[in-house]
Amino acid sequence: MFCYVIRKKKTMKFLIYLVVFVLLFNGLTANRVENSLVQKYCNQSSQYGERHFYKFCIASLEENVESRKARNVDDLTLIGTNNALSNLTNVKRIVEKILNERKYKSKLSKKLLQNCLKLYSEGYEALTSALKYIKMHDLLKLSFRLKKAKEAASICEMGFNGDNQQISPVMKENEVLFDVINIPYMFNFNRHR
């Protein structure tokens, strides 16, 4: 009887270890799949972009916990678009703060920043439409809306970098915004090839 109880305890202990091992192994495997998925699509997308795009793409997606659940390029495109919406909202708040606190350099800078706010609003509308088109699998309209959103950051900067000799107070933020929007744009672009 005593041997039976000891054997049963050992069996139970073994089963507990086995379950823990399986759960840990499954978690590590899922993490590897997610990482390889992000790396695969960031690598494909970086072939047509700037050199820094690959590392930026991976860092941007991996900092979002939702990317761990991604199982395909549609999921990653959705996550990238949500990241872009969040980033655009933050840049818009920065510009609003500069305008509200009157931290612009001249009346022309004020006018250019107000124009940027309009562009960001259009970009926001374009990104929210893009989310709808991702779910509908309408890749052509998705591409158009993501391209429209990318224009917000670049046109805002072009206003400052023209002949008017104004310096954009959000130049770095606009560069990052452009790259963040470029992630889902390039994922979608690669699906058309």
Image: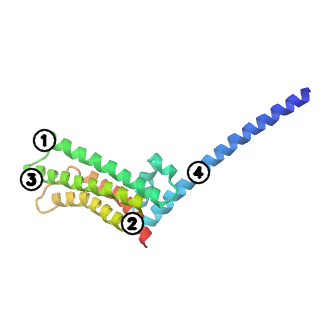
Q: Secondary structure at mark 4?
A: helix
The front one of 154 and 167 is 154
Residue 102: numbered disc: 1
Residue 139: numbered disc: 2
Q: Which residue is mark 3?
A: 108
Please tell me which of labels 1 and 4 falls first in the chain: 4
What's the amino acid at mark 2? Answer: Leu
What's the amino acid at mark 3? Answer: Leu
What's the amino acid at mark 4? Answer: Ala
Please tell me which of labels 2 and 1 falls first in the chain: 1
What's the amino acid at mark 1? Answer: Arg
Residue that extends furthest to the bottom in the rendered view of this protein: 193
Tell me, yes or no, whether the two marked residues, 4 and 2, touch with CB atoms within 8 Å. Answer: no
Please tell me which of labels 3 and 4 falls first in the chain: 4
Q: Position of residue 4 (x, y in %)?
A: 89, 31
Please tell me which of labels 3 and 1 falls first in the chain: 1
Tell me, yes or no, whether the two marked residues, 2 and 1, touch with CB atoms within 8 Å. Answer: no
Q: Position of residue 142 (x, y in %)?
A: 35, 63
The image shows residue 10, relative to residue 118, as above or below, that is above
Marks 2 and 3 sit apart, C-alpha to C-alpha, by 39 Å
Mark nearest the camera among 3 and 4 is: 4
Q: Which residue is mark 4?
A: 30
Q: Residues within 10 Å of mark 1 (few under 14, many from 20)?
A: few
Placement of the C terminus among the 4 image quadrants: bottom left
The front one of 184 and 49 is 184
